[in-house]
Image: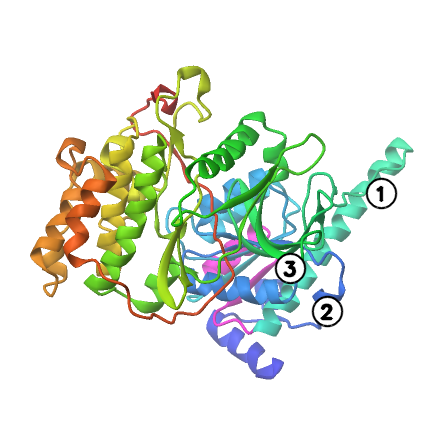
Amino acid sequence: MPHASYDDTSRRCLGIRYDSPEGARLWRFSRPMERPDAASVPNPGRVLAVDDDEHLRRVVVMMLRKASYDTTEARNGVEAVRLARERTFELVVSDVQMPDMDGVEMLRTLHEIDPNLPVLLMTGAPDLTTAMKAVQYGAFDYLPKPVQGDVLLSSVARAISQCRKRRDEQLELRELRTGERLERPLPNPTTEVHTGTLLSGRYRVGRILGEGGMGAVYEAVREDLAQMRVAVKVLHPRGQANAAHVARFRREAESVAAISHPNIVRILDFQAKEGEPAYLVMELLEGVSLREAINLDGPFTQKRATFIGSQVLAALAAAHHAKIVHRDLKPDNVFLTSMAGLEDIVKVLDFGIAKPLGTTAEQKLTQTGMVLGTPAYMAPEVARGGDADPRADIYATGCLLFEVVVGRPPFESDNYNALLFAIIQSEPPSLVGLRPDLDPAFAEVVMTAMAKDPGARFQTADDMSRALSPWVTSSPSHRTTSSSAPVAFEATLLPNPAGTSDDDES
């Protein structure tokens, strides 16, 4: 579409009179400009992409990464603010309409953290009031959806260029005041990892595969061993300065290495030396996460669900026998790959908040007053601030099976506290009522796993696996879009609603 058409569409969508003073200020928001070739720049820039709609967010992320931008994802404004406090970004690209914290409020909060951080807002329902608030709070750009790729990338390039120009101007002013030559903030090779970094003289880092609050996962090759392809999970620089974060990272490597099960991702190496990035090396998986498979394929058949569920339970049984509780089982941490022509082979990922059973108070690595885990799959006793034992993983498995056959989790809410309250107080919807074609006995297995009372659930993963065995057969081929992506996102940290400490776990 020609730029002129885009300009006309922008004016119509926003409903703004551009001959007014306010309109003149907003006109620059939809003015297309030539975009520098990001791929030709050694360090194009670090961008945070924010949108509660996963499909739209992934489109933006794919577009930015294709243009060589180092891109991190956030599912909402609250998560974006948390990431901005933990890491340094040169631009935030965000949707406007989001639950809990909309894009304009997020913009205001981000500028309290860093007044020079450019924020580009996009909206599918543009209006003058919101646009004026965006201007008031200092938005770099305000674009109506659908946003064309060349227009978005043009704005992104301009924003990052402006961010770096302001940074350099501030350094020059400080130099004039102090009379000293100050170092420019370039990536520190001992702490920051980017595409092309060589770790420990062996692992050459490639493209980024996924990222969470604690670390990022990259594709890499081991140059001293026949260019073997691996996945490298690197602790974020700020986490490397925190001894508790490094200890938790080490515990993840030790936990997975201690289990050694075919349905659990293999750990190949670990590094945590002073002055170097902390990282762990995993097998590189080809396939999709269970989350992506649900989004791509919709509700699963009972046969496919039980085939996947039985493998998850086999992995959990091995972990529990090794006295380890996963504590963050969710579709993002279950990866589907293929082996010997058989599809839907499960690999359980991310033992970052796994808990060794019998941990003493002196061995706690979690924060006081925080609940670790992802709310939608959190057992009621954990949501209340209680301890997580193997039955909490059984509950999460029940939630997974519910979601794969229905297409959504048993409990949903736009508000974290409301979600936790529903998990604690409400019964999940009837599975047979939502899927009348399911075997009632199979539905009963899933509902038993999600019992509010831990004592009413299956007491071990082996018990639940035996209960599912009548429906377990090899899964047929499911050809979903493949990616080399061991998605190792970190746990969500939530305030403890009960006011108790996760440090009380035993």
Tell me where the magenta segment starts and ends, as one range: 128-148
Q: Which of marks 1 and 2 is in front?
A: 2
Relative side of 358 to 278, left or right: left
Write the residue at 75% across / 49% down: 166
Type of amino acid at the residue the image marks with label 2: Asp
Judging by the rendered image, the residue that carries numbered circle 3 is: 69
Q: Is residue 418 visible?
A: no
Please, which residue is most extreme toward the right here?
Answer: 179
Q: Is residue 28 magenta-colored?
A: no
Q: Mark 2 points at which residue?
A: 37
**Closer to us: 85 or 13:** 85
Chain-order first, disc 3 or disc 1: 3
**In the picture shown, does residue 160 fall above or below 176?**
below
Q: Residue 345, position in %: x, y?
A: 37, 58
Q: Quadrant of residue 155?
A: bottom right
According to the picture, the residue beneath numbered tag 1 turns out to be 172
State the CA–CA distance, disc 1 to disc 2. 27 Å
Disc 1, SS: helix
